[in-house]
Amino acid sequence: MALPFGVRQKPALVEMPAQTMAVVRSVGDPNVVGAQVFPALFGCVFTLKFKVLKPRGIEFKVGPPRARWPLPLETPRDEWVGLWGIPVLDDVDELPQTVPDVAVGLEIWEYGTMAHILHLGPYADEVPTVARLREFIAASGYEIAGAHEEEYLSRPEAKQMKTIIRYPVRPLAI
């Protein structure tokens, strides 16, 4: 599988365009709330693909899910705020709701200059990878300018889990 935006296990800076996203907001331990979020998010996006876009002759490939974690990673997990998203076409203006009590909304996720790295392994083992990325950002003359984001390229039960970790960055003010 080709990795998006040239991501590798070595930190890098890239430019990414803004993207329209189907988004679910959550509060709580991701291992708990994910069980509610993913059915709503994937149900919505696959319904959009097959029942709304395909009958109109519009092709759409469902990409991997992402999550933004706006609070510091040291926050107790049961207090984490999550913004879970899947990219959709820019001209989508309404989403089919498929899971009662879990709203899926539309948002534009701004990107721009991003620092990213590929993490191989369980989510629980991301700390050294995140530290390497943060060190790279500082050594490159940048600072973090927004939320921690992850893009999940494999399922949690995969033999080799793959996660892109990224941060928006800006040049350090001198």
Image (cartoon, rainbow, N blue to C red):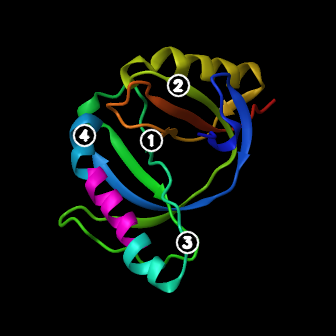
Q: Quick check: marks 2 and 1 in contact, CB under 8 Å? A: no
Residue 28, label in figure: 4
Secondary element type, mark 2: strand
Q: Position of residue 43 (x, y in %)?
A: 31, 62
Q: Secondary structure at mark 4?
A: loop
**What secondary structure is the stretch in magenta mostly built from?**
helix
Q: Is residue 137 left or right of residue 45?
A: right
Q: State the image coordinates of residue 37 (x, y, percent, origin top left).
A: 28, 51
Q: Residues within 10 Å of mark 4 (few under 14, many from 20)?
A: some
Whole-angstrom CA distance, mark 4 to mark 3, is 35 Å
Q: Amino acid at mark 1?
A: Pro
Looking at the rendered image, the disc whose residue lies closer to the viewer, 3 or 1, is 3
- Assign the C terminus to one quadrant of the image: top right
Magenta residues span 37-48
Q: Is residue 31 left or right of residue 154?
A: left
Residue 120 is one of the magenta-drawn residues: no
Label 1 or label 4, whichever comes before in sequence order: 4
Residue at (70% x, 37% y) in the render: 6
**Label at residue 70:** 1
Placement of the N terminus among the 4 image quadrants: top right
Q: Residue at x 59, y 36 (%)?
A: 167
**Mark 2–mark 1 distance (CA, rounded to whole Å):** 19 Å
* Residue 25, position as x, y percentages in the image: 34, 54
In this view, the mark in front (2 or 1): 2
Report the side of 44 relative to 102 (left or right).
right
